[in-house]
Image: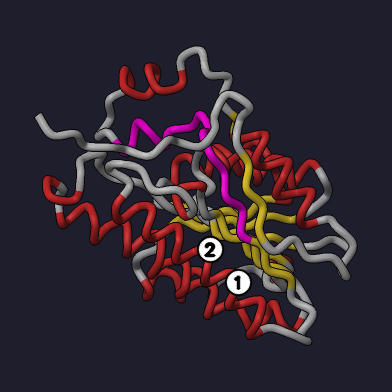
Amino acid sequence: MTRTALITGATAGIGAGAARAFVAAGWRVIGTGRRADRLQALADELGAAFHPLAFDITDEGALDTALAGLPEAFADIDLLINNAGLALGTKPAQDSDLAQWRTMIATNIDGLITITHRLLPRLIERRGGIINLSSVAANYPYTGGNVYGGTKAFVKQFSLNLRADLHGKGVRVTSIEPGMVETEFTTVRTGGDQAASDALYAGSDPMTADDIAATLLWVAELPPHLNINRLELMPVSQSFAGFQVARAG
């Protein structure tokens, strides 16, 4: 039986990597994102097993319209991968842009819970799965992480609470919590500063989108009686930050 995965934020990075990995493994994939041209390029690459849905995850009406218009072959969704998300800004809270905070909350939390709520009946009916992309920022604070880290902590805890609520329904729920992955993430966070992105990843041998995509596929294809509750990943070059100490004088 061919299974179907819906992957949000499939226009780049982990989402695009996951779409490729799942199609290669024999899944049908619905890929969502704002950039229709990138989704169409992915559809051209992956063929009939990939169905593009172009909409903004923060637009509830557009989300509902997109889901209602799914072709029959893609309507039975077995897996939701909540990958869409972003970080904006690197300044400490007192210097941050409130509009950027609100955009992160709208995307990383509001969009995620809305599509999850919409798809829960289908996922329960099919005894499917949910994989939510959180972050090590959910577990370890750092300067400038403020609202981004807060949104990812929500994603982690929401995943665990979904597991509790779905007890006995056969639906698996996993929180994936990556550290440094070289994608467009830092370019977006810094407002398009490619040099800042290059400097962050230089010489660090970071994880790649394909590394995380392979992890998502592994989780999805485990025997149905196994659930990975949380999975934290870092490149070997990254470890835990030390405490900060402010000294007088």
- Above or below, 57 against 203 in this view is below
Residues in magenta, as a range: 175-189
The residue labelled by disc 2 is 156
Image location (x, y in percent) of residue 247: 19, 34
Q: As drawn, which residue projects farthest toward the top? A: 203
The kind of residue on which mark 2 rests is Lys
Left or right: 222 with respect to 31?
Answer: right
Image location (x, y in percent) of residue 146: 29, 52
Classify 10 Å Cα crowding around label 2: few (below 14), some (14-19), many (20 and above).
many
Q: As drawn, which residue projects farthest toward the left? A: 249
**Image quarter of the C terminus:** top left
Which residue is at 26% across, 39% downward? Answer: 90
Foreground pick, 59 / 151: 151
Which residue is at 55% across, 60% downward? Answer: 82
The residue labelled by disc 1 is 160
Which residue is at 48% across, 40% downward? Answer: 38
**Image quarter of the N terminus:** bottom right
Circles 1 and 2 in contact, beta carbons < 8 Å: yes
Image location (x, y in percent) of residue 46: 69, 40
Image location (x, y in percent) of residue 13: 53, 37
